[in-house]
Image (cartoon, rainbow, N blue to C red):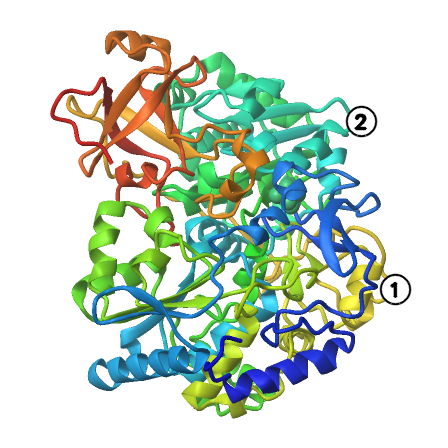
Amino acid sequence: MSPGRRRHPLLDLLHQREGALTRDLVRRPGGFGLGQLPVRLAPDATTPMICGFCSTGCSLDVHLQQGESVNLSPTTHYPVNLGMACPKGWEALTPLRAPDRATLPLLRDAQGRLQPVSWDKALDAFVGRFKTIQQQHGADAVAFLSTGQIPTEEMALLGAVAKFGMGLVHGDGNTRQCMSTAVVAYKEAFGFDAPPYTYADFESSDVIVLVGSNLCISHPIMWERICRNPHNPEIVVVDPRRTETAVAATQHYALRPKSDLTLLYGVANILITRGWIDSAFIRGHTEGFEEFAHHVSRFSIGRVSAASGLTVEELERLATTIHEGQRVSFWWTMGVNQSHEGVRTAQAIINLALMTGSIGRPGTGANSITGQCNAMGSRLFSNTTNLLGGRPFTSPTARRTVASRLGIDVTRIPDRPGMAYDQIIEAILAGSIKGLWVIATNPAHSWINQPHLADVLDRLDFLVVQDMYTSTDTALRADLVLPAAGWGEKDGTFINSERRFGVLKKVARAPGEALADFYIFKLVAAAWGCADLFEEWECPEAVFQILKRLSEDQPCDFTGIEGYRMIEERGGIQWPFTRLSRSGEGERRLFEDGRFYHPDGRARFVFEDPRPVREATSSRYPLVLLTGRGSSAQWHTQTRTEKSPMLRTLAPRQAYVEISPGDAADRRIHPNDRVVITSSRASVGARAFVTPTVSPGQVFVPMHYPETNQLTGSSFDPYSRQPSYKHCAVEVRLPGPADQLS
Ligand code: SF4
C-alpha cells in the first residue's frame, strides 16, 4: 500500500476472510491484502481450471513454480477438450501481465483527468453519486451492464446486490449481444432455456447441420470433436460466406444474407410434403404442428429458391440429406442469433428437429452454441432478464420462492424484468437513466451503431467502469474506474455450452489493489449499507451453495453437486444434477424421455412470416456488410488477446474487408489497397482482402476492430432485443482527398 493511503476497513475484513477460506495464502511483502496466491496449491503444483475465453469450456492445466503460474497446457483427460486447446487457451495467462492493467481505483478530477484514489474514496464516490442520482431521478435512474466473462457466483452477487440491495431495476449483460435470441427461442419452444445437447453428439451424428456458425475458428475444439466423428458424417454448412468451416464441410449452401428463415421454412415444407417427418414423435411430444404445416405450405420450392438464391436442386439435396440421416443434429450460433428475426429463425431450426424426431437421442438435437465462457451462467443466475434460477420476475410465486430461500423480504425483488441493453441505451439518451455501472465489458467498442453510442455515453452523469484494464474504449470514458482481477486471479465456476459446470481458480496475484469482482461487489454492498443482506454470500463457494438452493425444482436443478471438489473430481458436471442424480455418470442430453418443460410436457412449434431487413441495399449503399469472428486468435474487442505477442502474429492488426473479385474490379480495388467503407452512419478505413469467399454484393469485416461497429446500424430482434450485426448496407471505394477516416 502506498504511504499515506488508508486501507478501507472492509478490505481488512475481506482479506481475513479470503485468508481463512484458502488457509494457505502466501503474504506478498508490501502487497495489498488480496493479491495473493491460494495456499491449497503447492508452490510447484499443476492445477486444472476452465479457460476464460469461449463457451467451449476447455480445461487447462496451469503450472506453478515457486507459487507463480508460469505456463499451462491443455488437460489431457477432460471430457470437453481431450487434451486440445486453441491459440487463445494456450495464451490465457499472458493478458494478466499486461502493462495497462488497472491497479488502483481512478476518479476523474475537476480538470477531467482520471487520478488514482484510495478504495475508500472510490467507494464514497460510487455511493455518493449513484445515491444522489437516485434521490433526484428515482431508483430506476441507475443501471448496470454486465458480462458473460465472470464466474456465476460473481454474476449472482452483482445481480442480487444491484437489485435487492441498491434497488436498481435495470441491468443487462453483454450476453444480450450473443445469446438472448437462443434464450427466447428455447423458452418458447421447450418451456425453459435449455440447450439439450452434449458434445458427444458431435461425434455420434451422421448428419451435422451448421447454420450461421463458423465453428472452425469460433469454436475450434468443437470442430475438433466433429473431426473425431467416426461415422463419416455429412457436414452441412448454411452460411452466405464460404467460411473456413464451409470449405471443410461436405455441403455448403451459400444463401443470400438473411434469407435463412425463408430457407428453413422451405426445407420444412419439402419434408412435410414428402412425408419425411416423424409423425409419432410429433403426435406424442409436440403442439402446433398442423398450424405450422399450414404456415410453411406457402413456402414453395420456387419461392424459396428465388429468395435464397439457392437452386431447386440444392434445396432438394438439403432436404434429402436431412431425411436420409439417422442421427441428425442441428447447430447454430451468431449468424442466426444476431439477426432482426433471430428468434423465429432459431425456432425454425428447432421445428426441423422436432418434426423429424431429431432430439433426445445421441447425435441429434436443436443445439444453440453459446459464445462467452459463462454465457450459460449469465442466462440462469445474473438476475437480469431472469430472476435467479431462470425464473420470471413477473411471477409472484417465483418471487416468494426466491425471497424465502434467500431469507429476504419479498418486496426487495422487482416485479418486472429490467430493460434490455438497447432499451437502457435509449433510456440514457432520453434522460431517464443518468448513472451506469459497466462490469467487464466494453460497449464503447462492441455495441452496434457506435456513433450513436458515443453520444449516449457522454450524456451520463456518472459512468463507473469495473475492468481489468484502464485502456478499454469504455474505461477511457469513465468517471470512476474500479480495478478488477481477471481470469486466473479468482475463484468460481463457469457453465459451458453443454450445461457443464467447471471450476476456475486463483493461480496468480492480481496486480496492485485490483480485487476480484466478487469482493468489489461485497465492498459496494457494505458501502451502500446493505451488507447485512449478503452475510451468507461470504465467498464464491458459499454462493455456489446458495445458488444450489435456488436451483432446486427448476430444470437447472444442481442440488446433487456437493461443491467445487466434486466438480473437479468428475471432470465437470452438467445440469440438471439433482440429489437423485448422484449415482449418474457420463455425458447427458436433455429430453431423452420426450418430455419438455411446458406444463403439458410438449414442445411447441413457433413460427411467423419473415420480415424485411431494416436497412436494404440501395444505389448509394449497394453492398451487404456481414460481420463475424476473424480468427481463432482474436476474442471480441481484443482487450485481452491483443496483449499476447503470439496471438497478434496470427491475425491482421488492422481492419480489413473481404470483397469479391468482381466487386473489387468494378471499383478498381486491388488486393491490400487502402479502402473506405461507408454506411449511412460512418466512413472507416480498411485494407481490401479480395477473395471469392464472399459472394458478389456482400462484404465481410471481422467484429474485432473498432471500425466495424461504426458501420453497423440499430436493428434488433423484436423478441430477444438482440442486435442484428449481420446485415447493413454499405459501399466500399478507394479513398479520395477529402476522406478523414476513423
Ligand atoms: Fe479456451 Fe474456447 Fe479455445 Fe477452448 S476453444 S481453449 S475454451 S478459447
Which one is earlier in the sequence, the residue at label 1 or at label 2?
2
Circle 1 crowding by C-alpha within 10 Å: few under 14, some 14–19, many from 20: few
Left-right relation of 597 to 20: left
Question: Residue, x 41% and y 19% (percent of image)?
Answer: 694
- Quadrant for residue 438, please give it: bottom left
Instruction: Name the spot of residue 537 as percent of width and height, x first.
Output: 61, 82
Question: Residue, x 71% and y 67% (percent of image)?
Answer: 37
Q: Are marks 1 and 2 in contact (CB under 8 Å)?
A: no
The answer to whether 639 is drawn above or below residue 123 in the figure is: above
Three-letter code for the amino acid on which mark 1 is drawn: Ser
Three-letter code for the amino acid on which mark 2 is drawn: Pro
Residue 583: give its label.
1
Q: Mark 2 points at which residue?
A: 230
Q: Is residue 280 visible?
A: no
Left-right relation of 731 to 271: left
Instruction: Name the spot of residue 232 as percent of width and height, x first.
Output: 75, 22
